[in-house]
Image: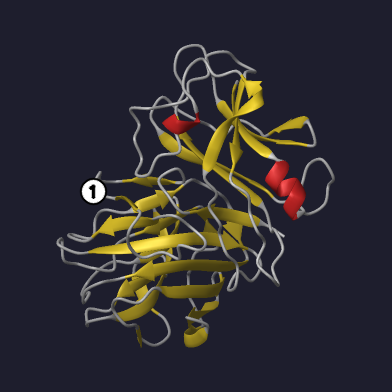
Amino acid sequence: MARYFAGNSLASFNRTNSTITESTSTGFDSAVVGSSLQVVGGTGADYAESWAFNASGTLHWMFEFFQNSATISGVGPALYNGSTGVFRLRNSGATNRIQAEYWNGSAWTATGVVFEWTNNVRHRIYVSITLGSGFTAYLDGGVVTTGSGWSGGGTTVTNIRMYPLAGNPATATWYSQIMLADYNVQDSKLFTLAINGNSATNTGASSGVYTDINETPLNESTIISIGTAGNKAGFTKASLTVPSGHVIGAMVINARGRITGGTADGLIGVRSASTNYSGSGLGYTSSYGPKGRIISDDPATGSAFTQTNFNNAEGYLEAS
């Protein structure tokens, strides 16, 4: 199974405007995550964009959102291939009504029927999409619209854009638990676990400690710096209690960063059973940007993480 993306904060999203930030007070399930992504309305030109991935075939997209006022003419959440649209859920131009659209190669084209939601309620949207063919969308567990017969539609998705559903600059849309996979994620949960300490083993930071990067909202004036290739800075985290009926689908580590000086790139790794497992270079540049690594199985066992092994594992950042 492929896990293409999972994110909940600016560690996993770029933003086109600094008015897009993280909220610790609005629009999220506090039993699962500690914040939401607040995307301010206005012209519709601004959005939060995920780090890049490559997805095709049948995709399963889930997120939660909250809106505290009537919305008209907002662009809404969308799937893109680079800068070319693939699929989106936009405000239809009428209050609290969403129309699904796909890009047919030259224009956004309506697909399926309009559906409605209620203000001041956190909603969960799940969409199953067969690229180039059709989709089915669910709101809070029930089917609300479906469409097929797409002509000229895109067959690859490389990023997610979260535009506001609100066209009014005085309002915003709050998004959380945003994930995309090749399997059904309708009932999946994206737990965010606070970093709560520095690793006792991976101590290769040139400067900075865990409190410099676990803040909400984002603050790029405080950082972890790793100046030597091969050095690692690791962190402990809060424990996860797996809900009844669920299993751990993956460990997701998102890290906003940049390269400078003598470092060529950055890696994300996991330390499990006293062994470090580094990922591949993530393509960091000289400008701050989000990157992520999704570790589907415990690298120490080759099988799904158990709760104990997951809780004992440490994530780390590495210079290369």
Q: Quadrant of the N terminus?
A: bottom right
Residue occupying the point 65% across, 33% down: 280
Of 244 and 94, nearer the camera is: 244
Residue occupying the point 39% across, 57% down: 36
Residue occupying the point 16% across, 66% down: 168
Indicate left or right for 169 with 122 as reference: left
The x and y percentages for residue 305 are 76, 52
Is 46 situated above or below 27? Answer: above
Of 71 and 174, nearer the camera is: 174
The x and y percentages for residue 94 are 22, 82
Looking at the picture, which amino acid does disc 1 mark? Thr
Of 3 and 158, nearer the camera is: 3
The x and y percentages for residue 77 are 38, 64
The residue that disc 1 covers is: 19
Is 104 situated above or below 276? Answer: below
Q: How many marks?
A: 1
The answer, for residue 297, to whether it is visible in the render is: no
Residue occupying the point 60% across, 60% down: 56
Q: What secondary structure is found at the residue carrying circle 1?
A: loop
Quadrant assignment, res 80: bottom left
Q: Quadrant of the C terminus?
A: top right
Quadrant assignment, res 111: bottom left
The answer, for residue 144, to whether it is visible in the render is: yes
